[in-house]
Structures are given as C-alpha cells and as structure tokens.
Image (tube, grey):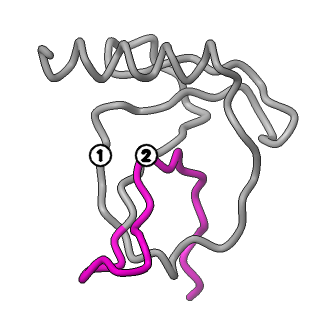
Amino acid sequence: MVAKQRPVLVLAYPQQDDARALVVVLPLTGELRGMRGEVDIGKPKWLPKHSAVNIQGFASIDRHALTRKLGVLAPAQLNAVKDAICDLLDL
C-alpha cells in the first residue's frame, strides 16, 4: 500500500552542515472546521481545494520526505500563520 502524500507548509529547512536533516512543517488540510488552530488560506492555485494551515500540527520530517514544491503563500497569509503561531504558543 502506498502512503498518501499530504501538503505541508515548510517552516524551517536544515542547512547543509546540520547534523540532522529534519524539516519543521505544518500540515495543510482541506477539511476546514473553523477552529482556533486553523489559518484559512483560501484556494491557492496550487491546491485542489479551499484549505487551511493546521497550526497545532507541528512536525519534524526527514527532508527527503519532501517530494516537490507546490507553491508559496502570499505575504498576508504567511503573516496570519505567524500571528496564529504566536497566539497558540502565547509568545
């Protein structure tokens, strides 16, 4: 059985000299629930449907698990994600 690929927002990518090749990501979801932990990003042209960033889903994955770049968030969307992360972590 082949694992389903899921889109993610890359927050931190390792440098060449990093001991671990881990990428910090947040998952994207097409199942919006209107919860505090979601940042609505609408329907970018590079995603098949209206989506949100799940800011409660921080994960570290091996950089080789990333297969291809789908697109880039607009500055306003990225700022909304940053603000939501700061709110979530009480920063």
Q: In this rendered view, identify the residue nearer to me: 64 or 18.
A: 18
Q: Quadrant of residue 6?
A: bottom right
Image quadrant where one finds the C terminus: top left
Q: Is residue 7 left or right of residue 89?
A: right
- Left or right relative to 31: residue 34: left
Residue depicted at x 45% and y 11%: 34
Mark 1 and 2 residues: CB-CB less than 8 Å, in contact? Answer: yes
Which residue is at 30% across, 77% downward?
18
Q: Secondary structure at mark 1?
A: loop
The residue pinned by badge 1 equals 58
Distance, label 1 to label 2, CA atoms, is: 9 Å
Q: Amino acid at mark 2?
A: Leu
Q: In the picture shown, does residue 48 fall above or below 75? A: below
Relative vertical location of residue 38 with respect to residue 14 in this rendering, above or below: above
Q: Which residue is mark 2?
A: 11
Taking the image as shown, residue 78 lies to the left or right of residue 46, namely: left
Residue depicted at 54% across the width and 77% down the height: 3
Q: Position of residue 51 (x, y in %)?
A: 64, 29
Which quadrant of the figure contains the N terminus?
bottom right
Within 10 Å of the Cα at label 1, are there few (<14), some (14-19), or many (20+) other Cα atoms?
few
Comparing 16 with 28, the one in front is: 16
SS assignment at label 2: strand
The residue stretch that appears in magenta: 1-22
* Residue 36, above or below 57: above
Q: Is residue 74 left or right of residue 10?
A: right
Identify the main secondary structure in magenta. loop
Q: Position of residue 17 (x, y in %)?
A: 35, 81
